[in-house]
Amino acid sequence: KQEVTQIPAALSVPEGENLVLNCSFTDSAIYNLQWFRQDPGKGLTSLLLIQSSQREQTSGRLNASLDKSSGRSTLYIAASQPGDSATYLCAVSLRRTGNQFYFGTGTSLTVIP
Amino acid sequence: ETGVTQTPRHLVMGMTNKKSLKCEQHLGHNAMYWYKQSAKKPLELMFVYNFKEQTENNSVPSRFSPECPNSSHLFLHLHTLQPEDSALYLCASSAKGRGSGGQYQETQYFGPGTRLLVL
């Protein structure tokens, strides 16, 4: 069974700082990996999706990398802003199980003004 | 707005009640999902529907009963729930397609969720 771990569970940084969130998974036979953002009491918003054949994806101040062989992904946030405060979730989809994502427990990010 | 709506947003029910959660998507997607999110636990996939056919049922108790009348609507019927079923229930949709090497899915779009409290 795929296990997805996110470290740290919580992170607090001053505004303007660059930061990295980590995601690791136990089964490297993934089809894709997706990073989501969740605001308190709300649904998930997709940030970036990386196919297994790709090594990274970028969107604005966000950059996600994927290293399938080591079972790791990172989400890099540049020049953090208070509006970035949210929980960030990582999810992987396994080729053999079709359309099912396995989620981590998330990293709760607080950006202090 | 993600194009996926859920009603109600909040629900309080007793253990003997029967209620239904509704999800609707206007994205032209053909796969829909129910997830359960409990505090301090990863999102748990409950059910998957592809082209209105249920393709995944992750050992969900029978007190949860899904229904997908068409590719735009998904329901979760609830009856005789337990207090431990209190959670945020999220609906999602995606455009499902087939690529080389088997089935795959594209980005999932989530609704805002229904916060359920079982007393």
Image: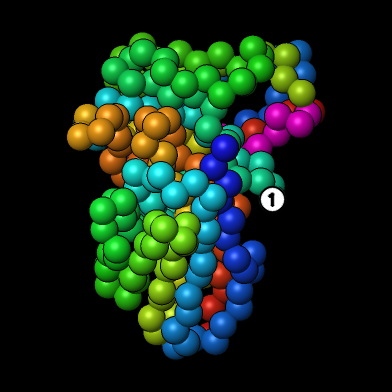
Left or right of A70: which side holds B94?
left
* Visible residue check, residue A37: no
Q: Residue type at mark 1: give it.
A: Lys
| Residue A83: % across, % down | 45, 72
Left or right of B14: which side holds B42?
left
Depth check: give the residue in front, A28 or B94: A28
- Of the 4 image quadrants, the one containing the C terminus of chain B is top right
**With respect to residue A55, does A99 lie above or below?**
above
* Visible residue check, residue B107: yes
- The residue drawn where x is 42% and y is 68% is A75
Residue that badge 1 annotates: B40
- For residue A31, what is the image quadrant? top left
Depth check: give the residue in front, B5 or A63: A63
**With respect to residue A108, does B8 lie above or below?**
above
What residue range appears in magenta?
B83-89
Left or right of B27: which side holds A103?
right
**With respect to residue B42, does A16 lie above or below?**
below
